[in-house]
Image: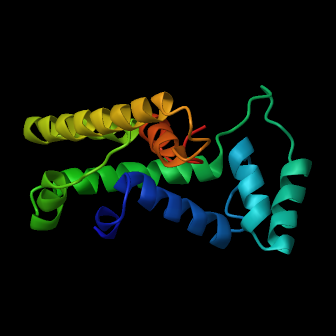
C-alpha cells in the first residue's frame, strides 16, 4: 500500500526496494548462479567478505552435467515476490486506498500492467487499460515535445526515463 503513494509504477517501486534489501541482507542463501545484473549488484552492495565467499563458491562450483546454467537466485526471488504482490493487489483492488489510487493519477509500467491484466477481473482489466492508455498518451506528448524542441540539450531526460520505465519496467528489474 505504501508504494501506491510514491511516483511511478508501484510494483516497480516495491520490487526495487525488495531487490535492494535482498542484495544487501542475504549473503549466501543457495546462490548457484547470478545473472549479469545481479552479479554486479551483489558485488557493489554486499559486505566485501560475504560477496567474496559467494563468488569463491560460484567460481569453484562445478557446472551441471548438461552445462546448463541454473536460474539467477535473485531474479527468482524478485519474480516470486512480484507474483505475490500482484495477487495481493488483485485481491484488494476494491479496498478504499487501492480504489482511490486506481481513480487518481495511477501509473503502471507496461510489463506490470500486462501481468496484472492476466490475473484481474474484467472491471480491473478495464481500469488497467485506462491507466496504461493515459500513461501512453502523456508520455507520447512529452516525447513529441522533446523531439521537436531542438534547443534543449538533455532537459527532457525525465520524459526519456519515464518512457523507458513504461516500456520495460524500472532499471534492473528485467534483463
Please give the count of numbered marks on the rendered protein. 0
Q: Does 10 sit above or below residue 51? A: above
Give the farthest residue toward the top: 66
- Give the left or right position of residue 170, taking residue 127 as reference: right
Report x, y in % for residue 129. 20, 34
- Give the left or right position of residue 123, taking residue 101 as reference: left
Q: Is residue 114 visible?
A: no
What residue is rendered at 37% in x and 51% in y?
9
Which of these two is toward me, 60 or 16?
Answer: 16
Q: Quadrant of residue 7?
A: bottom left
Report x, y in % for residue 24. 66, 70
What residue is rendered at 9% in x and 57% in y?
94
Colouring chosen for the image of the structure: rainbow
Report x, y in % for residue 106. 25, 52
Q: Is residue 67 visible?
A: yes
What residue is rendered at 86% in x and 47% in y?
61
Which of these two is toward me, 74 or 140?
Answer: 140
- Quadrant for the N terminus, please: bottom left
Which of these two is toward me, 162 or 59?
Answer: 162
What residue is rendered at 65% in x and 64% in y?
23
Q: Does 147 sit above or below residue 58? A: above
- Quadrant for the C terminus, please: top right
- Give the left or right position of residue 167, taking residue 62 as reference: left
Q: Does 110 sit above or below residue 95? A: above
Amino acid at each position: 500500500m505504501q508504494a501506491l503513494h510514491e511516483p511511478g509504477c508501484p510494483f516497480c517501486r516495491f520490487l526495487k526496494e525488495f531487490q535492494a534489501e535482498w542484495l544487501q541482507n542475504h549473503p549466501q542463501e543457495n546462490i548457484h548462479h547470478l545473472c549479469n545484473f545481479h552479479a554486479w549488484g551483489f558485488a557493489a552492495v554486499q559486505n566485501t567478505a560475504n560477496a567474496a565467499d559467494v563468488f569463491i563458491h560460484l567460481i569453484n562450483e562445478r557446472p551441471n552435467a548438461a552445462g546448463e546454467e541454473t536460474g539467477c537466485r535473485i531474479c527468482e526471488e524478485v519474480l516470486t515476490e512480484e507474483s505475490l504482490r500482484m495477487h495481493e493487489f488483485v485481491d484488494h483492488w476494491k479496498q478504499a486506498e487501492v480504489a482511490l489510487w486506481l481513480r487518481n493519477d495511477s501509473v503502471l509500467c507496461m510489463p506490470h500492467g500486462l501481468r496484472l491484466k492476466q490475473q484481474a477481473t474484467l472491471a480491473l482489466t478495464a481500469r488497467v487499460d485506462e491507466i496504461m492508455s493515459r500513461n501512453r498518451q502523456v508520455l507520447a506528448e512529452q516525447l513529441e515535445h522533446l523531439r521537436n524542441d531542438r534547443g534543449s540539450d538533455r532537459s527532457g531526460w525525465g520524459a526519456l526515463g519515464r518512457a523507458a520505465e513504461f516500456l520495460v519496467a524500472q532499471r534492473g528489474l528485467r534483463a
